[in-house]
């Protein structure tokens, strides 16, 4: 992610937009099912109308909440990254911990501290899982290279299409009855 968008401002806009879209998709799905199940079964498409009404009334709120939460997370991550002068997983862990605490501070100090602890635990586990998967993938690639070299194959084989030029028309040998012209091609 950091190599794709190096500037914090553009990263902020990109991530907040992505969170808004994810919130819209998740909110639409959740509220459609909830509206469909909670409406009384009437004839003439009453459940479908209630589901669409639930989507139209609740999805903007959910997508706005997702976008606002990502705005706080991304702003704090940019602050932590600029303060530490590094781009690593600790920036995300610290920023997500602080943002979970800030987003729940309206419920009180103990709820904010508990929420920050949950955020720290969750995102530390997430970063650890990411690093483990990255390490496993690197070992898998390295072992594949070692096996190829051991078998006498090149370490990296480029995948490309091989174009074979069309063959010219074969020459037809015409042998005449004259022994002097035997085996000549016309």
Image (cartoon, rainbow, N blue to C red):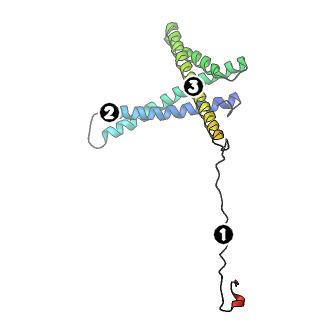
Q: Which residue is more in the foreground, 158 or 97?
A: 158
Question: Which residue is pictured at 61% across the width and 21% down the height?
Answer: 92
Q: Secondary structure at mark 3?
A: helix
Q: Secondary structure at mark 2?
A: helix
Question: Which residue is pictured at 41% across the width and 32% down the height?
Answer: 30
Q: Which residue is more in the foreground, 153 or 133?
A: 153
Q: In what quadrant of the picture does the N terminus appear?
A: top right
* Residue furthest front in the image: 179
Q: CA distance from mark 3 to mark 2?
A: 41 Å
Question: Which residue is pictured at 66% across the width and 62% down the height?
Answer: 164
Q: Position of residue 154 (x, y in %)?
A: 68, 44
Q: Position of residue 11 (x, y in %)?
A: 66, 30
The residue pinned by badge 2 equals 37
The residue pinned by badge 3 equals 132
- Other residues around mark 1 within 10 Å, as few (<14) / some (14–19) / many (≥20): few
Q: Quadrant of residue 134?
A: top right
Name the mark nearer the viewer: 1 or 3: 1
* Residue furthest bottom in the image: 178
- Other residues around mark 3 within 10 Å, as few (<14) / some (14–19) / many (≥20): few
Q: In what quadrant of the picture does the C terminus appear?
A: bottom right
Q: Position of residue 29 (x, y in %)?
A: 42, 35
Q: Earlier in the sequence, mark 2 or mark 1?
A: 2
Q: Position of residue 76 (x, y in %)?
A: 63, 20
């Amino acid at each position: 992610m950091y190599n794709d968008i190096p500037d914090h401002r553009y990263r902020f806009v990109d991530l907040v937009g992505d969170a808004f879209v994810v919130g819209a998709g998740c909110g639409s799905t959740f509220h459609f099912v909830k509206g469909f199940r909670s409406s009384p079964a009437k004839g003439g498409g009453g459940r479908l109308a209630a589901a669409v009404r639930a989507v139209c009334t609740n999805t903007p709120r959910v997508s706005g909440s997702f976008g606002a939460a990502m705005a706080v997370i991304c702003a704090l991550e940019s602050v932590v990254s600029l303060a530490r002068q590094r781009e690593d997983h600790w920036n995300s862990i610290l920023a997500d911990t602080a943002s979970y605490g800030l987003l729940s501070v309206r419920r009180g100090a103990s709820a904010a501290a508990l929420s920050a602890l949950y955020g720290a635990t969750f995102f530390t586990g997430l970063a650890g899982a990411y690093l483990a998967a990255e390490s496993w993938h690197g070992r898998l690639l390295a072992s594949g290279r070692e096996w190829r070299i051991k078998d006498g194959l090149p370490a990296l084989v480029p995948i490309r299409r091989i174009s074979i030029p069309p063959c010219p028309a074969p020459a037809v040998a015409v042998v005449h009855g004259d022994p002097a012209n035997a085996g000549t091609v016309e």
